[in-house]
Amino acid sequence: MADLKSQTPTQVLDVLGRVCPYPLVLTKKALEKLPSGGILKILCDAPASAEDSLPRFAQDKGMTFEVVKLDQSWEIYIQKG
Amino acid sequence: MATKRLAFIVRALPYKTEASRLALTHAIASQSVEIYLKDGDLVEASVSFIGDGVLNCHKNQQGMKHYGLTTIEGHYKNSLLLDLKVLICKEDLDRLGLTENDLLMNAEDIGGETNAQIVPYSEIYKEMESVDHLLFC
C-alpha cells in the first residue's frame, strides 16, 4: 500500500461534525475537481463514513486510499487515479 | 452503467409536516447510494418546490423561535452544496407575492456553487415527465 499520509495532500477536506451521507458526497465532489494523481486528505469523525462508505467508495473506484484512526476521529487519504 | 433519475416534488409547507424535510434528506442521501450499486451505476436527484411548498425556500426562517424545530434552511442549503438541481415554481411565487429577494437562492456561505432556479411550472412538469421515479412530498 502506498504511504499516502507521508505525502503533502493536494487538498484537505474537513467534514468534522458532519454525518453520513455528507462526508461521502462532499468527498465525491472534491475528488471531481482534484487533478489526476492528487491526494485528498479527509478529516472525519463519523464512524460509518470513515470505516465503511469512504473506503468502499475509493475501493470501488480503484483509487489508492489509506485510513488513519486518531483518538476521536479519522484521517482518510485518497489518491485520485 | 445506468443513471436513475429521481424527482422529489415538494408541495408541503416547511413546518406543518416532516414531508419537505424528508424530501430533502432523501434527495441528499440518494447521492451516496452508488457505493451499493453495480459498477458505474449512478443516481441523480432533483427537488422541485410547487404550491405552498415554495415557502420552504424562504430565507431567514425562524423555525426554532416559532415552532421549536431546527430550520429547514440547513437541509435546503446542503442540497445546493451537493449540486442538486433545485427548481422553484414561478407561478406559485407570484401567487404568494414572493420574489427572488425573499428566497434562499444559493449556499455560498457554506461553499455551495449551485443556485436554485425559479422556473415556470411547465419546466417542472418537463422534469416530472423525464425522470425514472417521481416522489410527491
Image (spheres, helix red, strand yellow):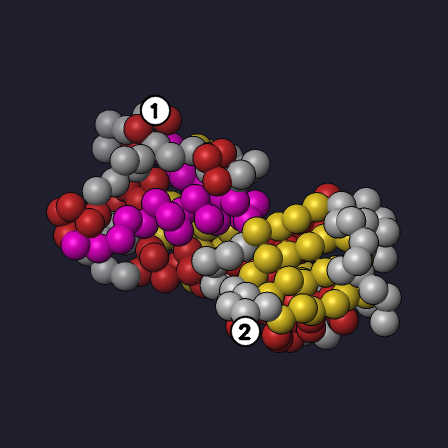
Q: Amino acid at mark 2?
A: Ala
Taking the spot 59% from the left edge, 57% from the top edge, the residue there is A43
Local crowd size for mark 2, using a 10 Å CA cut-off: few (<14), some (14–19), many (≥20): few
The subunit carrying tag 1 is B
Q: Which residues are magenta?
A: B68-92
Q: Is residue A37 left or right of residue A40?
A: right
Q: Amino acid at mark 1?
A: Asn
Q: Quadrant of residue A4?
A: bottom right
Residue B40 shown in magenta: no
Taking the spot 54% from the left edge, 73% from the top edge, the residue there is A48
Taking the spot 72% from the left edge, 53% from the top edge, the residue there is A40
Residue where numbered disc 1 is placed = B101
Q: Position of residue B137 (x, y in %)?
A: 35, 59
The subunit carrying tag 2 is A
Residue A39 vertical placement versus B100 (above, below): below
Q: Is residue A61 left or right of residue B20?
A: right
Local crowd size for mark 1, using a 10 Å CA cut-off: few (<14), some (14–19), many (≥20): few
User: B45 and B63: which one is in front?
Assistant: B63
